[in-house]
Amino acid sequence: MRLTREDESFQGMMVAIHDVTSGAKLKDDEHDRKHYWEIFNSTNDALFVHDAYTGAIVDVNKTVEKCMVHA
């Protein structure tokens, strides 16, 4: 979902992801986890991981951490 301000300028995006793997085993779990974290932390976009049921923030990437230090 595209988020816009009152003046219709771009503010951000909201994305929902649903795990459809149904517990399928990955061939190389450790490699996949490392690759995921490299991607998660290398983007300049602020990424938040939320618990779908509680809405609690579970994790944030390095960009969010940098923004919080400079806030």
Image (tube, grey):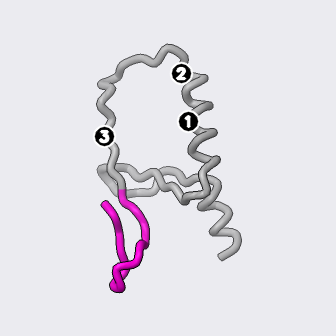
Q: Which residues are magenta?
A: 1-14
Quick check: marks 1 and 2 in contact, CB under 8 Å?
no
Circle 1 SS class: helix
What is the distance, in whole Å, between disc 1 and disc 3 at their CAs? 16 Å
Q: Is residue 58 left or right of residue 5?
A: right
Which-is-in-front pick, marks 1 and 2?
1
Query: Callout 1, which amino acid?
Result: Tyr
Task: State the residue position of label 1.
Answer: 36
Residue 55 on image: x %, y %: 35, 57
* Residue 69 versus residue 51 in the image, above or below: below
- Quadrant in the picture for the N terminus: bottom left
Q: Position of residue 21 (x, y in %)?
A: 33, 26
Q: Which mark is residue 29?
A: 2
Examine the structure image and report whether residue 67 is included in the region drawn in magenta.
Answer: no
Residue ID at (69%, 69%): 69
Question: In the figure, 18 relative to 46: above or below?
Answer: above
Distance from the alpha carbon under mark 2 to that under mark 3 = 19 Å
Residue 22 falls in which quadrant of the image? top left
Task: Please state which amino acid type lies under the numbered disc 3.
Answer: His
Q: Is residue 48 shown left or right of residue 8?
A: right
Q: Is residue 39 above or below residue 55?
A: above
Circle 3 residues within 10 Å: few <14, some 14–19, many ≥20? few
Q: Are marks 2 and 3 in contact (CB under 8 Å)?
A: no
Q: Where residue 37 sits: x, y (%)? A: 59, 39
Seen as rendered, the residue at the extreme top is: 27
Residue at x 42% of width, y 66% of height:
12
Q: Which quadrant of the structure image shows residue 39? A: top right
Q: Secondary structure at mark 3?
A: loop
**Residue 18, label in figure:** 3
State which tag comes first along the sequence, 1 or 2.
2
